[in-house]
Image: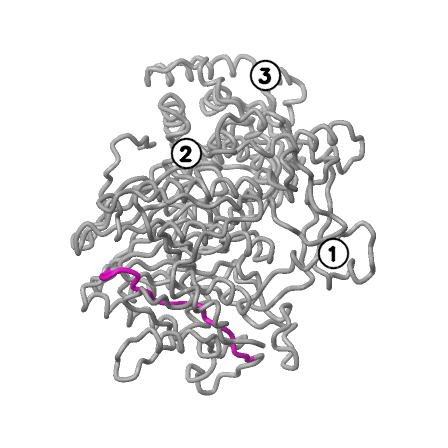
C-alpha cells in the first residue's frame, strides 16, 4: 500500500493550479475576480454534504456510456425515483454546487470549507469530476479545505464490489452498474454494467487525489499540522509539514473495544486491532485564521475483520451512526489534540473555526426526546444523536465554534458548562435537499462571530435533465409491472421553475414515498395522509363517543378508518354512529371560533392539504426557520392556531396490547398524538437563530440579526 503523497500532488498543493475544467466544459475560465478591496480574505464559506455526482462523467465502459444528449454529451444520471426516495438528490447537485461557488466567489469569499460527503460515494468518476471543478475555482483564487464524511470514504479501504442499481437509460429504465469485483460482474451477468469507476475509494486514494484541498500543506499556508505532528524545536516549515503529511505518519491503532496504543486500559481485553488513518489537520491559510478540519469518522473493526487481510473493507463498520460518540472511545488522541489546538488558539489570538462531518450536540432543536416518544423506533435517524456525555466532552475541549453536516439540516445549538466553556454547533445544510444553502462565517472581533445563511433558490440549469426524467415518467406510466407501478412519481416536479421549487416538491415526494412509511406509526400516518388542516382543526375540537370501529357506519364525515386499530371490547356507553354528524358540526363551530380569534377563516385552512402538511413537517425538520419562510405568513399563522388548539390534557389512548383499540372515540388518538406532533413542529420551527446571527463568545449567547424571519413563537 502506498502511504506517501505523490510528488505531483504535493507540488499541486504548493501552488494554485491553472484551470482544467471538466471534460465537457473545457473552455478557459475567465478571470472575473472582483477588485482587491471587495475580497473578504478572512470569511469562510461552509458547504456541507455536496454529494457531488459527475452527471456528465465518463464511466469508461463499452457497455454503457449514459444517455446521449443533443449537445454531444452523455448524461450518466440516476433515476428520478431514486432521487425522490433518497435523503439527498444525486443529479442536480452538479448545478447547485457550481451555483454556490459562483455565489460565494461573487461575494468575495476565497476560503471554502467542505465538511464531508463531498461526493456521492467517493467513486473515481465522481471524485475526479469534483476535483476538476475545485481546480477550476482554485485557479480563480479560491482555496478549499475538506474534512472527510461517511460517504467519502464509505469504508476506510477500497470497496471494489460497490455499485448502484438505478442509473437511468435512454428508455427510462434502470441500469445496474457495479465495480468489477461485484459478484454479478464475476458471474458475467449480462444485465449488469461493470466498471471500476463505480468502486468506492478508501482513505489512501482519496487523500492522495485530494491532497491539495487541505489534506496536505500549501506553501502559501502560514501553518499546517496533524494530530501526530511534532515539529523540531517547535519551528514550522513547509518542508517539515510536507513530511508530516505522509499518510504513514497519520495513523493510530484502533480496536473493536476502543483506541489502542498508549490508550489501552490495563486489564481490559482488546481485539481486532489494526492501524488506520486519521485525516484531521489544522491549517492557517491566512494570518490569524485557524481552520480545524476534524476526521470524526470512526470505522470500528467488526466480526468480519481478518488480521491477515487488514485492508478488506468488509472488516469495518460504516461511520454513519458513530460520529462523535465513538470518537470519545476510539479516537482519544484526537480529543486531546482538539483541546491542545483550542488552548493554543486562545493563547495566540487565533480565530478558530472547527468543522467535521458530524454534529456535536442535539440537532433537532432539543426536540429529540419528544420525537422518540411520538414516532417509530429509530425514526428520523435519532441513532445519530450525540449523547449528552459526548456533547459535554466536546464543550470541555474549549472549542468555541464547530460547523457540522451529515444530517442535511439547517440549525444552531449552543451549550455552556460549569467550567465556563461555551461551544456553538452550526449545522450547515446540504446543497442537495430542500433548504439548500451554505454558511458564511467570519469573526467580527475577538469575541464576536457572524454567521450568515445563503439559500440557493435560483440555480442555473436546474432543469437541464428534465427531458430525461420525462422519458422515465412515461415509461413508468405505461408499464403495468408491479415494480414499475410502485415507482410512479408526481410529474409536477418537472414543472419546477426554480431549484427552490424543485427541492420543495422533491421533499413532498420523499415524504410520501418514504418518510411516512418509515417514521410515522400506522394510525398517525393514516391521519396525516388523509386530513387537511381544516379537518385537523375540527378534529382537535371534537368531543364524541362514536368509536373508530363505528367510522365504517358513517364514512362521510371524515376520511379515517379503524384499519390500524386492534379489535377491542365495546363499552356500556355505546352511541349510534350517526351521532358523529352532529358532534362534527359542533366541533366545526368551535373550530371556526378558534380560527376567528386569530383573525383567520376556517375555510382557508383547507388550502393546506394533507400532502402539504406532512411535507411541511419534514421540510421544517430539515430546514428549520428556512422552511417557515417557504410556508409564508398565513400558513405559519394557521399552524400556530393548531399548536394551541388541542385540549390541555387529551384523553388517554386505550390499547389492546401495544396496539390502538378500535373502541377509542374517534378523536382520542388524534388529539393525544397530534398535540405532540404540533408541539414538535413548533419546537423545530422556533429553535435558536439559524439564518443570520452572531455568536457572542464573551456573553456566551446567540443574537438574531435577521429581522425578516418567521417563527412559531
C-alpha distance separating marks 2 and 3: 32 Å
Q: Nearer the viewer, residue 378 or 320?
A: 320
Determine whether 145 is above or below 637 in the image. Answer: below
Which color mode does the image show? Answer: one colour
Is 397 left or right of 482, judged from the image as shown?
A: left
Residue carrying label 3 = 557
Q: Position of residue 299 (x, y in %)?
A: 53, 68
Q: Residue at x 70, y 30 (%)?
A: 471
Q: Which residue is mark 1?
A: 194
CA–CA distance between discs 3 and 1? 56 Å
**Residue at 26% from the left image edge and 48% from the top image edge:** 40
Q: Earlier in the sequence, mark 2 or mark 1?
A: 1
Alpha-carbon neighbours of circle 3 within 10 Å: few (<14), some, or many (≥20)?
A: some
For residue 340, which quarter of the picture? bottom left
Please tell me which of labels 3 and 1 falls first in the chain.
Answer: 1
- Quadrant the C terminus occupies: top left
Name the residue at 44% across, 83% down. 265
Is label 3 or label 1 in front?
1
Image position, residue 272 (x, y; %): 58, 79
Mark drawn on residue 134: none
Specify start and end residues of the magenta stretch as a single range: 273-288
Q: Which mark is residue 627?
A: 2
Mark whose residue sits in front, 2 or 3:
2
Q: Is residue 553 above or below residue 308?
A: above
Marks 2/1: CA–CA distance: 41 Å
Looking at the rendering, which quadrant does residue 327 occupy? Answer: bottom left
Front of the two marks 2 and 1: 1
| Residue 281, magenta (yes or no) | yes
Q: Secondary structure at mark 2?
A: helix
Q: Is residue 185 left or right of residue 546?
A: right
Amino acid at each position: 500500500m502506498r502511504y506517501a503523497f505523490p510528488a505531483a500532488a504535493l507540488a499541486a498543493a504548493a501552488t494554485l493550479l491553472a484551470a482544467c475544467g471538466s471534460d465537457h466544459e473545457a473552455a478557459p475560465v475567465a478571470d472575473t475576480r472582483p477588485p482587491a478591496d471587495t475580497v473578504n480574505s478572512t470569511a469562510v464559506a461552509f458547504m456541507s454534504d455536496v454529494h457531488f455526482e459527475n452527471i456528465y462523467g465518463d464511466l469508461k465502459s463499452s457497455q454503457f456510456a449514459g444517455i446521449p444528449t443533443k449537445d454531444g454529451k452523455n448524461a450518466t444520471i440516476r433515476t428520478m425515483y431514486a432521487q425522490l426516495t433518497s435523503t439527498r438528490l444525486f443529479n442536480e447537485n452538479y448545478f447547485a454546487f457550481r451555483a454556490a461557488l459562483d455565489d460565494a466567489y461573487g461575494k468575495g469569499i476565497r476560503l471554502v470549507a467542505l465538511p464531508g460527503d463531498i461526493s456521492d460515494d467517493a467513486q473515481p468518476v465522481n471524485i475526479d469530476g469534483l476535483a476538476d471543478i475545485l481546480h477550476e475555482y482554485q485557479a480563480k483564487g479560491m482555496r478549499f479545505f475538506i474534512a472527510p464524511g461517511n460517504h467519502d470514504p464509505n469504508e476506510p479501504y477500497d470497496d471494489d464490489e460497490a455499485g448502484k442499481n438505478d442509473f437511468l437509460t435512454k428508455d427510462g429504465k434502470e441500469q445496474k452498474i457495479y465495480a468489477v469485483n461485484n459478484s454479478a460482474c464475476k458471474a458475467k451477468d449480462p444485465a449488469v454494467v461493470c466498471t471500476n469507476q463505480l468502486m468506492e475509494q478508501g482513505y489512501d486514494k482519496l487523500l492522495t487525489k485530494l491532497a491539495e484541498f487541505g489534506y496536505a500543506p500549501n506553501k502559501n499556508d502560514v501553518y499546517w499540522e496533524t494530530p501526530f505532528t511534532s515539529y523540531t524545536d517547535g519551528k514550522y516549515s513547509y518542508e517539515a509539514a510536507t513530511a508530516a503529511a505522509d499518510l504513514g505518519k497519520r495513523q493510530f491503532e484502533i480496536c473493536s473495544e476502543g483506541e489502542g496504543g498508549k490508550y489501552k486500559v490495563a486489564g481490559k481485553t482488546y481485539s481486532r486491532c489494526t492501524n488506520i488513518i486519521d485525516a484531521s489537520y489544522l491549517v492557517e491559510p491566512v494570518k490569524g485564521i485557524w481552520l480545524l478540519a476534524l476526521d470524526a469518522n470512526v470505522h470500528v473493526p467488526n466480526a468480519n475483520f481478518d488480521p491477515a487481510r487488514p485492508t478488506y473493507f468488509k472488516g469495518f463498520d460504516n461511520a454513519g451512526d458513530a460520529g462523535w460518540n465513538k470518537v470519545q472511545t476510539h479516537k482519544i488522541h484526537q480529543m486531546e489534540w482538539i483541546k491542545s489546538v483550542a488552548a493554543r488558539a486562545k493563547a495566540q489570538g487565533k480565530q478558530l473555526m472547527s468543522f467535521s462531518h458530524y454534529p456535536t450536540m442535539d440537532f433537532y432543536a432539543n426536540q429529540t426526546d419528544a420525537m422518540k416518544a411520538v414516532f417509530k423506533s429509530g425514526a428520523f435517524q435519532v441513532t445519530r444523536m450525540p449523547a449528552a456525555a459526548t456533547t459535554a466532552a466536546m464543550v470541555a475541549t474549549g472549542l468555541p465554534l464547530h460547523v457540522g453536516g451529515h444530517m442535511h439540516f439547517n440549525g444552531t445549538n449552543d451549550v455552556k458548562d460549569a467550567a465556563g466553556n461555551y461551544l456553538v454547533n452550526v449545522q450547515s445544510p446540504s446543497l442537495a435537499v430542500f433548504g439548500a444553502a451554505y454558511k458564511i462565517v467570519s469573526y467580527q472581533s475577538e469575541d464576536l462571530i457572524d454567521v450568515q445563511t445563503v439559500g440557493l433558490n435560483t440555480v442555473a440549469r436546474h432543469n437541464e435533465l428534465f427531458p430525461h426524467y420525462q422519458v422515465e415518467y412515461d415509461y413508468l406510466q405505461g408499464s403495468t409491472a408491479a415494480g414499475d407501478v410502485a415507482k410512479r412519481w408526481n410529474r409536477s416536479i418537472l414543472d419546477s421553475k426554480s431549484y427552490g421549487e424543485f427541492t420543495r416538491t422533491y421533499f413532498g415526494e420523499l415524504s410520501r414515498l418514504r418518510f411516512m412509511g418509515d417514521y410515522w406509526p400506522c394510525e398517525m400516518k393514516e391521519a396525516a395522509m388523509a386530513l387537511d388542516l381544516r379537518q385537523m382543526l375540527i378534529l382537535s375540537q371534537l368531543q364524541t363517543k362514536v368509536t373508530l370501529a363505528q367510522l365504517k357506519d358513517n364514512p362521510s364525515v371524515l376520511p379515517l378508518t379503524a384499519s390500524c386499530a386492534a379489535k377491542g371490547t365495546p363499552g356500556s356507553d355505546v352511541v349510534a354512529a350517526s351521532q358523529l354528524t352532529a358532534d362534527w358540526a359542533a366541533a366545526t363551530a368551535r373550530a371556526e371560533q378558534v380560527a376567528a380569534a386569530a383573525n383567520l377563516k376556517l375555510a382557508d385552512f383547507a388550502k393546506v392539504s394533507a400532502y402539504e402538511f406532512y411535507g411541511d413537517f419534514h421540510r421544517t425538520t430539515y430546514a428549520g426557520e428556512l422552511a417557515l419562510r417557504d410556508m409564508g405568513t398565513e400558513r405559519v399563522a394557521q399552524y400556530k392556531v393548531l399548536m394551541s388548539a388541542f385540549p390541555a390534557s387529551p384523553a388517554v389512548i386505550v390499547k389492546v396490547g401495544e396496539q390502538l383499540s378500535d373502541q377509542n372515540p374517534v378523536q382520542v388518538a388524534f388529539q393525544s398524538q397530534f398535540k405532540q406532533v404540533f408541539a414538535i413542529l413548533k419546537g423545530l420551527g422556533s429553535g435558536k437563530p439559524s439564518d443570520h446571527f452572531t455568536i457572542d463568545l464573551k456573553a456566551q449567547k446567540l443574537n438574531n440579526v435577521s429581522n425578516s424571519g418567521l417563527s412559531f413563537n
